[in-house]
Image (tube, rainbow, N blue to C red):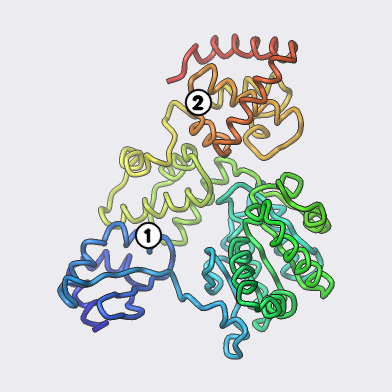
Amino acid sequence: MRDRILSSLKEKISRQQWEHWFIDFYVKRVEDTHVVFEVGNLFIKGYIEKKFDKVIKRALTEVIGQAASYEIVYAQIVNSENFDAEEPDNIALVRKKPVLITPLNPKYRFDNFVVDEFNQFAYNLLLEAAKRPGTYNPIFIYSEAGMGKTHLVQAYGNYLLSTNPDLRYAYLTSESFMNELVTKLKSGNMEEFRERYRKKIDVLVIDDVQFLSGKNGVQIELFHTFNALYEAGKQIIVCSDRSPKELQDFQDRVISRFQMGVVVQIKTPSQDAMYKIAKKVVDEEKANIDDSILRYVANHLKGSIRILKGAIVKLIAYKSMYNEIDISIVKSILKDVLHDDTQPSFNGDLIEIVAKHFRTTKASILSGDRSKDTTLARQVCMYLMIKKFGMSTRKVGEVFSKTHPSVISSVKTIEEKLRQNEELELLIAKIEKELEKNIGKAYS
């Protein structure tokens, strides 16, 4: 049955597409009329589901019948209970998505992690910690979403396991931690949960810890797990989209634990760093994309490193299928993730003018710099973009990598300050005149 399904599918897909997209695609199991396929990574899973859905359904109908259905899973899904079994004792535990546990991704390594000024300290810290486990403990890493935290902590895990494959390395999201805790609590197996996470692992990585905001019961359990591992000399790494002091509705004692080791930020990458990352993706895929195209994408992308990588892989796929690509094609197929040609210039001029008046820099405003003057300058930029130039909060959020609520809050902060601070009102009026002179009275 499995061979017949793959043979039928292969007949309907060109050799080039098969070799590019289906090299790691196979039938995991057949459940009556339902087929479960497995692929090597998440991007390929998404691409196949989107581009080859009709072809797959047609192949399954031929082999199984009209009632056939399918799903595609990423890598091998292992039941969390297997973590305590004897056979996989030397297999690392990685939970890349809530409630799913998968092996460490071997593609995440230190040697293919693009290091630049924005992430150099975090890279050096994790590399040194991998060479000398427990030296820096705990480690708290924070950045905007999609800036490389997952790559870094999994590279750390792969390095550790290459030198000591018996290590127990657990990587899970805060939601996974909470879900398992609740399940064990309801089933009366809390001791089993505590045994696993306090005594049976050597390295614990908790990602997206900000989602435990207000979850006091889970925070208490995390606090005691943290203490048990720390006292036993086990490595703890916490990842978040904000610094410890910015975490809302967290117990003070939990925050203090996060701050007792090394806190490091991965900042916003420069356009040059984005180009280097794009170039790295192309080199690893052994593809041929002109440098001018990579620089264009790096200079116009609105989003994170994760979005950049997805965009470059999409270009590689297009080039492999049609053997051509130029800037007009890039603009068309990446229109959802690229700025208009006019927008960066506008943003750049506005931010530079505001930076000058607040004695800071454009780079600082666009980065995660949270000094008083830079924060105020960033809020003024958002206020002017929305109130004076008519930009949407969504576009403003994309410029500064901020959420919609964060942008709204910044604008309200400036509006409140303007009612109370005449000096700020005069300064903004001065900035507005300079903006009108340099970039016009309206933005479209």
Amino acid identity at mark 2:
Ser
In the rendered structure, are the residues bearing label 1 and label 2 in contact, judged by CB atoms less than 8 Å apart?
Answer: no
Residue 408 x %, y %: 58, 30
Amino acid identity at mark 1:
Gly
Report the Cα–Cα distance between label 1 and label 2. Answer: 34 Å
Task: Give the secondary structure at mark 1.
Answer: helix
Residue 327 x %, y %: 35, 39
Query: Taking 170 as reference, is 80 left or right?
Result: left
Q: Quadrant of the N terminus?
A: bottom left
Query: Taking 131 as reference, is 260 left or right?
Result: right
Task: Give the secondary structure at mark 2.
Answer: helix
In depth, the one of 110 and 233 nearer the eye is 233
- Which residue position holds label 1? 46
Instruction: Please report the residue visible at 75 percent of the width from the left and 60 percent of the height from the top.
Output: 139
Query: Taking 366 as reference, is 230 left or right?
Result: right
Earlier in the chain: of badge 1 and badge 2, it is: 1
Residue 74 x %, y %: 43, 69
Instruction: Please report the residue visible at 78 percent of the width from the left and 72 percent of the height from the top.
Output: 229
In depth, the one of 208 and 148 nearer the eye is 208
Residue 191 x %, y %: 71, 79
Q: Quadrant of the C terminus?
A: top left
In depth, the one of 12 and 197 nearer the eye is 197
- Which residue position holds label 2? 345
